[in-house]
Each structure stands twice: as C-alpha cells, then as structure tokens.
Amino acid sequence: DGGITQSPKYLFRKEGQNVTLSCEQNLNHDAMYWYRQDPGQGLRLIYYSQIVNDFQKGDIAEGYSVSREKKESFPLTVTSAQKNPTAFYLCASTRGPGNTIYFGEGSWLTVV
Amino acid sequence: AQRVTQPEKLLSVFKGAPVELKCNYSYSGSPELFWYVQYSRQRLQLLLRHISRESIKGFTADLNKGETSFHLKKPFAQEEDSAMYYCALYSGGSNYKLTFGKGTLLTVNP
C-alpha cells in the first residue's frame, strides 16, 4: 500500500519539551514538505526538501527543525522555541515541481 | 516573494447554481497554479492544474496572467462539491517551493 504515513496521529506534550513528528513515504518521491494548518490560516510552509541531505526553510521555519537523511523520511522536530506549537501538521511529497503533491493524514500536536 | 490570496473564507450557494472560487497570486516569474480540495474527513487532494487545462468533476480554471488570477468555476454546483478548496502556486524552474492560499470553504445547500 503506497503513500505517505504520518505518526503519531495525536500527540500531547508539556510546554518546554521538544517533539518529533514522523513522515515516511514509499512513493520514491524526491521532494518532501511540512505544512502547518491553523483555522483561517490555510497551509503555511515550514520546511521543504528537494533531495536527500538538503532542505530549505519555508515561510514559518522559526522554532522548527528537520532532517533528510533518507529519501523516504522527513521528520519534523517542534522545539521549545516555537511560540505556538499547538496545531495540525501536514506532511507531503512529490516527484518534482509541477507534479501532483500527495498529503499524509496529518498529526495533531497539543502542547499544554 | 510568492503569495496566493483567496479573498473569500466562506462561500455558500444553492445546488444547481454557478460557483466561482477566487484566487489571485503575486509572483514575478511564470508560475504553475493548482487547485487542491479537502473533503470532510479526507486528505487534501489535487483537483486540477493549469498546465493540463482539463476539467475535473465539472470544475475548470483559467490562468489569467494579466489579472494574476486563477479562479475556479463550475456552472452547476452539486451538494458533494461542499469542501475546503485551496489554491496553490509553484514558482517553477528548479525551485520546489509550493505556496498555498488560506482556503475557501464552499457549502452547497440543497
């Protein structure tokens, strides 16, 4: 079964703790993305990676970090520096520019 | 900087009425534009892209470079069209950055 898998689906963390969200794809896609979806804000780009061992900041990268050590994996770490971490996070992947982007089911992060 | 603007957060129409979801963009180069849709409890999925110039589920969208717009249209709305619609822009070339608008929630009433 091909696709993008995000885990966990729901995550609760205490303020001040770092948390890592997992994103795995078996579509052999080169590019992967992390978006944050807040009510009324649409999808805002956090980080994206065009190829293994390379990634670029999106529009709201502050307080987040990523790595791309393997083609299939693009984990997102929400650090304690992120001021408003409670949100719905979406991972996506594509073969390349202009191609269809495929999305995961998302991860709900609640920081208390 | 690339930007996508969807001026309407909410749009409500009756079944059978025409519907137009507006999308304006700002980008100096030659962008590639897309519409994505999110039905209730489903993943975001591609609806259509401007380069293919195809009609999906009765929806069409024309890229107007003069007005920097990519409005989504359907002549006769159906109840199953109720969903969240996002306009998205690729800057093109070797840059993989994909920017989304804030989305428009379309409700088609019976």
Image (spheres, grey):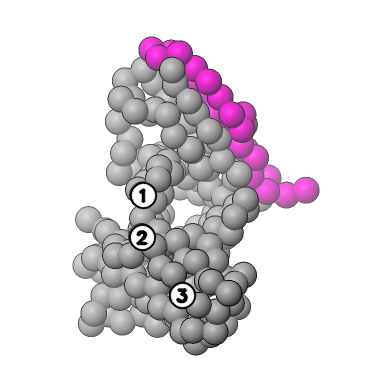
| Residue type, numbered disc 1 | Gly
Q: How crowded is mark 3: few (under 14 residues within 10 Å), some or many (20 or more)?
A: some
The residue closer to the viewer here, B29 or A77, is A77
Query: Which residue position is annotated with label 1?
Result: A40
Residue at (39, 27) in percent of width and height:
A85
Q: Residue furthest right?
A: A1
Residue B39 image point, x, y percent: 58, 59
Q: Is residue A79 visible?
A: yes
**Which chain contains the residue that carries disc 2?**
B
Query: Which residue position is annotated with label 2?
Result: B9
Q: Is residue B81 magenta?
A: no
**Is residue A68 depicted above or below B6 in this figure?**
above
**Which chain contains the residue that carries disc 1?**
A
Magenta stretch, residue numbers: A1-26
Q: Residue B13 carries which label?
A: 3
Q: Which secondary structure, mark 3?
A: strand
| Residue type, numbered disc 3 | Val
Residue A63 image point, x, y percent: 33, 26
Residue at (51, 42) in percent of width and height:
A90
**Tags 2 and 3 on a common chain:** yes
